[in-house]
Image: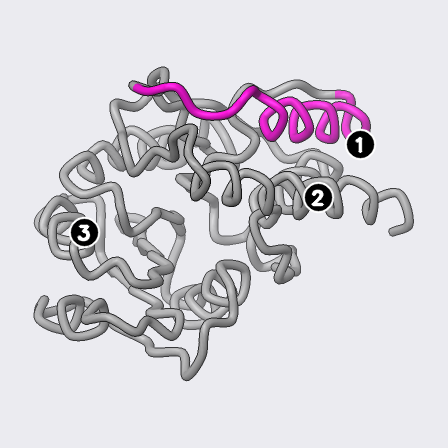
Amino acid sequence: MSKRTSIIIPAYNEGPRIKNTLEALIGIGDIHNIVVVDDGSTDDTFDRACSFEGVKVIRQSSNCGKGAALKRGVQEALDASDIIVFLDADLESSASQVAKLIRPILEERADIAIAKFPAATKRGGFGLVKGMSQMGLYLHTGQRLSNALSGQRAFRAEVLRELEISSSGFGIELSMLIDLLKRGYQVLEIDVDMSHRETGRDIAGFYHRGKQFYHITRVVMSKFFH
């Protein structure tokens, strides 16, 4: 019996990109189920996602955050899945690279596979967000990973059955990773040729990274008290 793989895509105001992302996933043989969780979008994300036959689209009444959207998607897909994959909605055509994340789980080489992106094509921040995440991961687990914040990751479904997904804002990926490594799960970083929107060195970019840094710092500190 083949293993069933579900893709969970949290989406907030991704109307211009969700169509291309879903088109890249449709027809990939290892994928059996696609769940889009529209996290209270104010654009046409929901309608565009609903236009794809066979894609389950869940609409949250308000913007509850990525953690809440992922949790809702896992609740929808967990019982019918052997493998669950988290993907961002803005990957567009590069979402087809998801097969590289699924393969190590199918081959039982890892419990979790995390996407390792190519180097950014434009200058972003100064490495503070990435540095904080790597330091926090090492402080709590003694392990070092280069892509602790990557939102593209595949799991054995059993792993998620034992994990409480919290609403940690931009720190959700790091929070989950710390908990998984503490439980002794095998994590493998996989090189992929994925790409998504990059933030630059403008006001919007620095504001976004400032929120990331705050949320990640909060996760790192809170783990010391739990």
Q: Which residue is drawn at 45% across and 32% down?
A: 113
Are there few (<14), some (14-19), or many (20+) residues within 10 Å of tag 1?
Answer: some
Earlier in the chain: of badge 2 and badge 1, it is 1
- The residue that label 1 is drawn on is 140
Which residue is farthest front? 203
Circle 2 packing at 10 Å, graded few (<14), some (14-19), many (20+), is some
The x and y percentages for residue 174 are 62, 40
Q: On the image, numbered disc 3 is attached to which residue?
A: 17
As helix, strand or loop, the secondary structure at mark 2 comes to: helix
Residue range in magenta is: 122-142
SS at mark 3? helix
The amino acid type of the residue labelled 2 equals Asp
Q: Is residue 135 magenta?
A: yes
Which residue corresponds to mark 2? 179
Give the CA separation, mark 2 to mark 1: 9 Å
> Badges 2 and 3: C-beta atoms under 8 Å apart?
no
Instruction: Point out residue 150 in the picture as x, y percentages from the top left corner.
Output: 47, 35
Q: Which of marks 1 and 3 is in front?
A: 3
Q: Residue 202 at what x, y percent from top left? A: 42, 34
Q: In this view, does 122 lie above or below 173?
A: above
Horizontal relation, residue 37 to residue 50: left or right = right
Which of the two discs, 2 and 3, sits closer to the camera?
Answer: 3
- Residue at image position (48%, 53%) is 157
Q: In this view, does 173 lie above or below 148?
A: below
* Residue at the (35%, 68%) spot, across then down: 37
Q: What residue type is labelled 1?
A: His
